[in-house]
Image: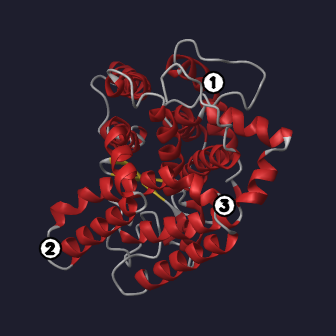
Amino acid sequence: MPANEPDARPRDLVIDLVRAGATTTVVFYHWVFTIIVWRPDGPHADNPIGYVSGLWSLTWILQVLPLFFMAGGYTHSLAWAKYRYTRGSWRRFAARRAGQLLVAALMLVGVVVAAVVLIALLHEGGDPWVTRGIILVLSPLWFLIVYLLLVVSVPLWDRLHQRFGELVPIALAVCAMGVDVARFRYGYTGLALANLVFVWAACHQVGWSWERLRDAPARFGHSLMLIGFAGLVGLTNMGLYPRSMVGTTSPLDRFSNMGPPTLPIVALFCFQLGILVAGRARLAEWASQPRVARAVSWLSRNAMPLFLWHSVGFATFYALMRFVWTVPESPGLLWWGTRPLWVLGPALLTIPLLGASARLMRPAGAVTGAQPRARAAVPAA
């Protein structure tokens, strides 16, 4: 499709809903379920999953990053179709998409550096906990690095899809399995980082096939769901993989299924994708309602800024709370009772950051206005 030819395909309501819902779920999970524990070297992030029996089951629904990568893959496949046959297509595509992500990252780093300098001036060189605080606030950048790698390699993934179709994500899942075998059976732990590419690229690559999945019968979705669920049950009950799809401090969990991702994340993606395919018609009907459409439109426009800045909002609110209250460091009755406060507080401090960052990340000439479905202004998503 020539670059100056508009894409005639309408917005996919389900993809917009998945992207908005996944971002919101991740942000709310971090705000609500993060426990800050102070140790001699500073703050460490914990969560209640390892404290409450059976709470790991929530992560099979709330760990939605695989679906976010899939939605991003679909959007990237459509965006690349406008550049594919034009001169300098990769350079212009990468500059436009990756540039917006880099601007967002630099903004976040700039704010954190300014805060560190201010702390150093106020405390004559800073405090020992500053380094740990920086790590926690900048933690969303791991996602951005992987996502950026997938963005700049979109032409490769597109060519692989044109040649091999649905075999590509299957092959990537097989590679992820091979990395886990090498890591856990033969001790090649250094290979584990390769799954940052294999696992997330497999999810991302399924986006190229979303239109076929969208048109598939509901029973195909049910089949995917059952296969994924069976894989999750089998893998997490073999004595190797933790049952939680996020990291915990439980002594039973020797490692995290997310750091770096393991084969259960692939099974989780299959399970959640099956639910999405089976319920696509109902989700599309719900997403078309005016109020839902407006909310999804706002979240889509602010998805990347929200993901990046929510940790700053949380850290700022936590710092304010420490001045007036002893924040609990374990999930007791008081901790659970104050969970609504940890949605409202970080949200009030994060929302003001979104406007300026979204304007800087939005491409020049972007269409804005009152039409909520006219355009998804999510940069590079």
**Mark 1 near mark 3, Cβ–Cβ under 8 Å?**
no
Mark 1 Cα shell of 10 Å, populated few (<14), some (14-19), many (≥20): few
Which residue is the site of mark 1? 352
Q: Earlier in the sequence, mark 1 or mark 2?
A: 2
Foreground of the two, 232 or 92: 92
Q: Return the x and y of residue 254 as percentages of the image width and height.
A: 32, 73
Q: Which residue shows up at 38% across the image and 79% down it?
A: 252
Q: Identity of the amino acid at label 1?
A: Pro
**CA distance for labels 1 and 2:** 47 Å
Q: Earlier in the sequence, mark 3 or mark 2?
A: 2
Left or right side of 120 for 364: right
Q: Return the x and y of residue 182 as percentages of the image width and height.
A: 18, 72
Q: Can you tell which quarter of the image residue 320 is in?
A: top right
* Number of dots carrying numbers: 3
Image colouring: secondary structure
Considering the numbered disc 2 on the image, is that residue within a helix, a strand or a loop? loop
Which residue is the site of mark 3? 336
Whether residue 37 appears in this view of the structure is: no
Considering the numbered disc 1 on the image, is that residue within a helix, a strand or a loop? helix
Q: Identity of the amino acid at label 2?
A: Gly
Considering the numbered disc 3 on the image, is that residue within a helix, a strand or a loop? helix
Q: Which residue shows up at 70% across the image and 41% down it?
A: 344
Which residue is the site of mark 2? 187
**CA distance for labels 1 and 3:** 27 Å
